Amino acid sequence: MGKACGSLQAGAGAGKGRNGGHRKLSLAVLLYDMESCKDGSPNNLQIKSFTTVREKNGIAYYNGDFLIAKLLKSISKLEIRTTQCNDAVSFNTCSYLNTLSFSTAVCPLMVSEMMPWSSIVRAVRPSFRCPFDAGEYTLKNATINMAALEKMAGSSLPEVLGKIYLPVLRLFDETKQLYGCVKFKASFINTRG
């Protein structure tokens, strides 16, 4: 199980092992969907296609194509607003969870090994670094850096099972104007039965 392979050992007490001890919970993130926001946000970051391939061990690989419609010289702010739902069918089970906002050194943060999305950014071709040239980009065999996600979430990570998460990522350009918006649909799964 690699550091950036989309699976991790998190928390104790998930169940009894053969020796009477506790087994650790092994979590993986599944991204079910990634699409451009359709709420009137600028359409500079256009998701053209997105697929998930999940292996038996729970590791998920993400592939897709997207377009950057105009040059993005620098990112002044990256914001991730997350809604949490108790089930996938009914939106009346959803509520606001949190907002993560980054406004200092965002370009280096995008490629930092310490961030859960670092494996995704490294899987983008051509390379995804500031400044972001206009053009077509491909995402191939990307994963979530679960070790970094575990560090960010801390002890609350085992509590995420059985819920659907709807993060919305918003990027702001060098003039602090909204550049683009992407919506995700995700859940955490236990990769051990």
Image: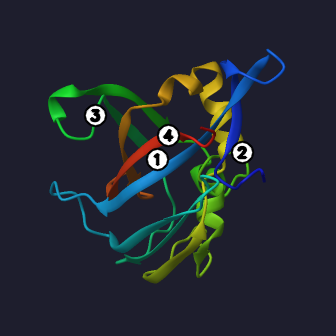
Q: Is 75 placed left or right of 58 in the picture?
A: left
Which of the image's four quarters has the C terminus? top right
Disc 1 or disc 2, which is closer to the eye? 2
Q: At x 58% / y 50%, what residue is drawn?
A: 106
Residue that numbered label 1 is attached to: 77
Disc 2 or disc 4, which is closer to the eye? 4
Residue that numbered label 4 is attached to: 188
Callout 1–callout 2 Cβ contact below 8 Å: no
- Whichever of callouts 4 and 3 sits on the residue coming sooner in the sequence is 3
Q: For the residue marked with disc 4, what is the amino acid?
A: Phe
Q: Nearer the viewer, residue 111 or 71?
A: 111
Q: For the residue marked with disc 1, what is the amino acid?
A: Lys
Callout 4–callout 3 Cβ contact below 8 Å: no
Residue that numbered label 2 is attached to: 114
Q: Which mark is residue 87?
A: 3
Callout 3–callout 2 Cβ contact below 8 Å: no
The residue carrying pointer 1 sits among few (fewer than 14), some (14 to 19) or many (20 or more) residues within 10 Å by Cα, namely: many
- The secondary structure type at the circle numbered 4 is strand
- Whichever of callouts 3 and 2 sits on the residue coming sooner in the sequence is 3
Q: Give the residue furthest to the front.
A: 18
- Whichever of callouts 2 and 4 sits on the residue coming sooner in the sequence is 2
Q: For the residue marked with disc 2, what is the amino acid?
A: Met
Q: Position of residue 54 (x, y in %)?
A: 53, 61
Q: Nearer the viewer, residue 44 or 161?
A: 161
Q: For the residue marked with disc 3, what is the amino acid?
A: Asp
- Whichever of callouts 1 and 2 sits on the residue coming sooner in the sequence is 1
Q: Nearer the viewer, residue 136 or 17?
A: 17
- The secondary structure type at the circle numbered 3 is loop
- Whichever of callouts 1 and 3 sits on the residue coming sooner in the sequence is 1
Up the image or down, 168 lies above or below 182; here it is above
